[in-house]
Image: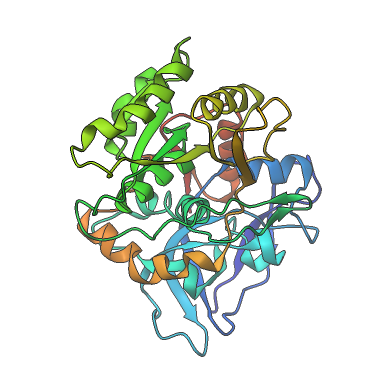
Amino acid sequence: MPPTNQAAWLLEAGSPLQVRDAPMPAAGPGEIVVKNAAVAINPLDCHMQDSGVFVQEWPSIFGCDVAGEVYEVGPDVNSFKKGDRVIGHAINLVSGRPEDGAFALYTVIPANKAAILPESIPFTDGVVVPFALEAAICTLCLETPGSAMPGVSTPALGLPYPTLQHPAPALNKTLIVYGGSSSVGSMVTQIATASGIRVISVAGKHNFGFAKQCGAVEVFHHGDPDVIEKVAHAVTSTNNHTSEPGNEDEFIGIFDAISTPETYAANLAILARLEGGHLACVHPPPSLDDIPGNVNVKTGMIFAVNDVATAVWRDYVERALRGGRLQCLPRPRVVGKGLEAIQGALEVVRGGVSAAKIVVEL
């Protein structure tokens, strides 16, 4: 008997998800269909449910992170076969198609946004990777600005892809990650470190060890009244780690994984002290009205779907997971099983999560 599909549908903005039947998806060119074993929840999912932002078609199936087995491959897909264990990034965010949303039993995933999940890694661990990985690559590796939303450009840091070398050859560049214990913040730390970038993290005091596990060389408490001065000093003193003249670190800027008025104020103060740099945000960036005219700050909001990530999905993810170079962090917190549990999982994320990613088994 052929399988049937169900999904957690969003019927209108601000309404709870409704579990109902859904059409069985088919894999087109360049696509695979994944039978989902686990899905993960991102803050973006809460915004989509609350306001309908990025929803193009009602009712909607959304969600970004899946892990499971390949059920079907498209006619031109040679990199996967039925039964393969995979993780994948669902792209309903840009396509608007219900079959491209993660919150279903079966989801269409672009083959260039999926990777084999090694047998040693449970689905509930692997599912924390996809959205955060692509967001990190979009943060770090875009060379020219694009559009995140009308009137808001993406950042263009133009940094190299991560390498499987361990340790990565040093680039003599320094990046601040504000919110280093968040899902995307910790992944940016991992990917930047694997690219040879020196990362300074800002996080809660109880998450210092986690931020360092992801690769941060120094971590500062966001609640420290002197955090601005301490972080700026850490950037300028990074030159002390090399004794070679002319090899001083270049300051890249700040990735703000929290992007609230409070974090923007701190980040702009740090950038003013360091005489400029990039400010890459997860929400629309702040006004620069209070920044001195001689301080060059380039802002942008990340948009976490872009073909810049294709090479990383193809050449890096499986091998890095297999070798431990890419860690499934933050650790999953499984809050339920079945499509009916997804609404509750969204509520958990709304309540705030630190150094963990909320996961539902299917």
> In the image shown, does 307 or 294 lie closer to the viewer?
294
Lateral position of residue 160 relative to residue 106, left or right: left
Which residue lies at the image location 27% right of the left edge and 36% below the top edge?
213
Which residue lies at the image location 59% right of the left edge and 55% below the top edge?
103
Expressed as whole percent of the image width and height from the top left, the position of residue 107 reads 56, 66
Q: Is residue 18 above or below residue 145?
A: above
Q: Is residue 27 above or below residue 199?
A: below
Which residue lies at the image location 28% right of the left edge and 44% below the top edge?
246
> In the image shown, does 27 or 362 lie closer to the viewer?
27
Residue 240 shows in this picture = yes
Expressed as whole percent of the image width and height from the top left, the position of residue 102 reads 57, 58
Residue reaching furthest front? 245
Residue reaching furthest top? 225
Residue 264's quadrant in the figure? top right
Expressed as whole percent of the image width and height from the top left, the position of residue 207 reads 36, 25
Which residue lies at the image location 68% right of the left edge and 63% below the top edge?
94
In this figure, what is the number of numbered marks? 0
Lateral position of residue 37 relative to residue 7, left or right: left
Residue 335 shows in this picture = no
Q: How is the image coloured?
A: rainbow
Lateral position of residue 177 relative to residue 98, left or right: left
> In the image shown, does 114 or 86 lie closer to the viewer?
114
Residue 108's quadrant in the figure? bottom right
Expressed as whole percent of the image width and height from the top left, the position of residue 15 reads 77, 41
Residue reaching furthest bottom? 75
> In the image shown, does 188 or 91 lie closer to the viewer?
188
Residue 249's quadrant in the figure? top left
